[in-house]
Image (spheres, helix red, strand yellow):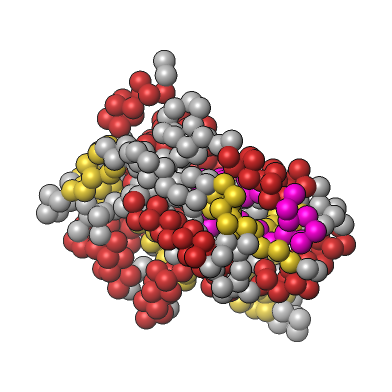
Amino acid sequence: MSIKDKVSEVLEATPKGLLINGEWRDASDGGTFDVENPATGEVLATLASATEDDSRAAMDAAADAQESWARTSTRERSDILRRAFDLVQEHKDDLALLMTLEMGKPFKEAQGEVVYGGEFLRWFSEEAVRHYGRYASTPEGNLKMIVTHKPVGPCLLITPWNFPLAMATRKVAPAVAAGCTMILKPARLTPLTSQFFAKLLVEAGLPAGVLNVVSSASASNVSGPIMEDPRLRKVSFTGSTPVGKQLMKTATDHVLRTSMELGGNGPFIVFEDADLDKAVDGAMAAKMRNMGEACTAANRFLVHESVAEEFSQKFAAKLAALKPGNGLDEDSTVGPLVEKKARDSVAEFVQDALDKGARAVVGGKAVDGPGYFFEPTLLTGVTEECRVFTEEIFGPVAPVITFTDEDDAVRLANKTEYGLASYVFTEDISRALRIGERIEYGLLGLNVGVISNAAAPFGGVKESGLGREGGAEGIEEYTTIQYMGLPSPWA
Ligand SMILES: O=CCCC(=O)O
């Protein structure tokens, strides 16, 4: 049976309502919105669209469930996460299919996201039971100190469209492990994966009210009333820097904890001593993963002037061999961009660079026909004045800029307000470590193009955000610390 034969069955099995206090229901005003396939423009499903009243109801459910959920044992939460991990494996192809349908990535790549995203469930099922406090004496010996970690409280989790499963599991799993209740707002363009994932969490035994899902055509219908509610204790957002800044301003009014995974402008630095074949493989992964629609994507290829020509030729040949097409077709290696606006924006970036003297060695334009496809593109002759140097492209476009020496490479890499992912290719370990110390990025791939992993702390510096997701650090974001002091029994 081909995966295409499963489309209607999986869409049928995906809940279309709002999950509030353990029940799937319609929006209070009966409103709906359509989810489209970016490869074909077809409507995939029609979902309930949460209103402000629905959002308040979700907030009530999360607030009411918080105290009893916080009292559950960590083993119980760990077991729920582990069952959810197993269910995600069982439904691997269903989740991958939904992602391919709603955001376009090739099916094989979507299966890879299920593996990556599922690991957050397994990782935090393991972290849940090993999150210790401490019992110690004050230096004077008069008091004993008990330091405990408590759940921060109800959280609003706002996820993006580019990794519909992994960005949800990366937030939901640590929140469950820590004992927080949640309101999940999936991206308007890609709610189906989250709706299906929520169904699996309910099946795994998550009690009513712990996870509430409010898909909506209107982001403000959800964030407005919830962010104003004094019972909310935290907001975690993955998305653009301007939206993140806006949420942070609102969060200030209630002194909310925030985790912000925002934009990037990743440099991919290739030194003259790099293994160029390895660097090209790394470049393909860092640029073309998710069609370039990743905050970790390499945005600027900074290449030493002595190897720029050879690197560009090899990289261009690999890009030219890719095949854009519907992600459900087995031979497609690049999916469409998520919507027309996204494709138009990529086209504008390329035009701006061409107008400023760059050359498209391969690609350079939208693909004719249905769907929002853009040709994998390599630009040379790019300068610091081009928008592709200063802004996040979020598409399959690789601008190459040359540098003269190590200082120049560091200067170019740091010349941005962002600081999320970066990549360095060199065979000189001392140089790699020197660059690591000098560049202002939260993530650095040394001779590798993808480093995201559930066990690693993911996050940026500067305007790329605050906080870390994943790793041992990920659970801390959902806890607060309480210190209890008591007289020492020896005093
Ligand atoms: O786009 C943001 C997330 C990318 C990743 O987790 O590797």
* Closer to the camera in the image, 217 or 349: 349
Which quadrant of the structure image shows residue 138?
Answer: bottom right
* Closer to the camera in the image, 490 or 309: 309
- In magenta segment, residue 309: yes
Which residue is at 40% across, 78% downward? 249
Q: Is residue 472 visible?
A: no
Q: Is residue 27 visible?
A: yes
- On screen, residue 149 versus residue 435, left or right, reads left
Which residue is at 68% across, 50% downward? 312
- In magenta segment, residue 133: no
Which quadrant of the structure image shows residue 137?
Answer: bottom right
- On screen, residue 321 versus residue 340, left or right, reads right
Above-or-below relation of 472 to 136: above
Image quarter hosting the N terminus: top left
* Closer to the camera in the image, 42 or 133: 42
Image quarter hosting the C terminus: bottom right
Where residue 268 appears, as percent x and y from the top left, is 67, 58
Above-or-below relation of 262 to 75: below
Name the outermost residue toward the bottom.
140
- On screen, residue 81 versus residue 301, left or right, reads left
Above-or-below relation of 178 to 385: above
Which residue is at 70% across, 44% downward? 314
* Closer to the camera in the image, 258 or 463: 463
Where residue 370 appears, as percent x and y from the top left, is 33, 38
The stretch in magenta equals 282-310
Where residue 361 appears, as percent x and y from the top left, is 59, 50
